Amino acid sequence: MAEQDVLGALAAMVRERARGGGPGAFLVGMAGGVAVGKSTLARALAERLAPGDVQVVATDGFLRPNAELAAGDLIRRKGFPETYDVAAFARFLAELAAGRAAAMPVYSHVTYDIVPGETRTVGGEGVVIVEGINVLQSPEARARFGLRIYVDADPEHMHAWYLRRLEEIVAKEPGSLIAQIRDPAQRLAIVEAAWRDINLVNLTEHIAPTAAHADVVVRKAADHVLSELVVR
């Protein structure tokens, strides 16, 4: 299946389901592992839905601040279910579903932390695509989504994409936390350990199982191209 066909099919599903939605925003949930390409797919889907009212939201903003994670000895489990403010995420979705604007914290991929005092307000109308590794993990969140999507790929491919993404951050964001590790060998060792001990474990134990709750599974090939769409 060609990538444009996958995007077209997803956009058609959103439009069809949104027509029968409630009074508030029509919420699309998009889950998948780290570096699988959720953000890219969410933006591409939003472009396909244009010129309609479409917003894209990442759940990184609902990660607990690093200081709070450190106090709870959770830094090395960042991204695992217990490191998110699940209650705040549920309230955010409830507000949007009711047609009310909702504010959410802002996460920086330069500092790898919540930006103190900064928020983003999301309108409670149109289509809101919510993407993140934890999107389909709680029953309360799953119940809010009119369409649930899981983005799937071979973990080895995701590993390669993860390394490539961090290399791009180092090149483009010299002020980022990862770029501060000047020794390339040391940086690679830290990144590999993070993938092996955190991201891969989280994928296997907590993220991949949520594919069972998806209405649609989108599969990606080794070249990062959308290759298959499976409707449940």
Image (cartoon, grey):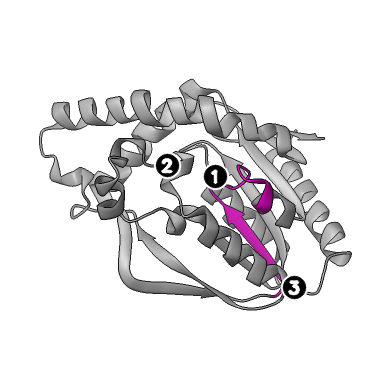
Residue nearer the viewer, 222 or 137: 137
Do labels 1 and 2 touch, CB within 8 Å? yes
User: Is 168 above or below relative to 62?
Assistant: above
Whole-number angstrom distance, CA of label 2 to CA of label 3: 29 Å
Q: How many marks?
A: 3
- Tell me if residue 163 is in the magenta stretch: no
Q: Which residue is mark 3?
A: 24
Identify residue for label 1.
134
Q: State the CA–CA distance, disc 1 to disc 2.
A: 8 Å
User: What residue span does the magenta drawing correspond to?
Assistant: 125-140
Q: Secondary structure at mark 1?
A: loop
CA separation, marks 3 and 1?
22 Å
Comparing 25 with 7, the one in front is: 25
Does residue 92 lie above or below 200 as drawn? below
Instruction: Name the residue type under label 2.
Output: Gly
110 relative position to 42: left or right? left
- Residue 159 appears in the picture as rendered: yes
Q: Quadrant of residue 113?
A: bottom left
Rendering quarter of residue 197? top left
Q: Is residue 219 visible?
A: no
Going 32% across and 40% down the picture, which residue do you hit? 74
Residue for badge 2: 79
SS at mark 2 in the image: loop
Q: Earlier in the sequence, mark 3 or mark 1?
A: 3
Q: Image point 29% across, 25% down: which residue?
A: 192
User: Which badge, 1 or 2, is on the more N-terminal residue?
Assistant: 2
Q: Secondary structure at mark 3?
A: loop
> Where in the figure is residue 149, as x and y percent of width and height?
69, 44
**Amino acid on which disc 3 is placed:** Gly
Q: Earlier in the sequence, mark 2 or mark 3?
A: 3
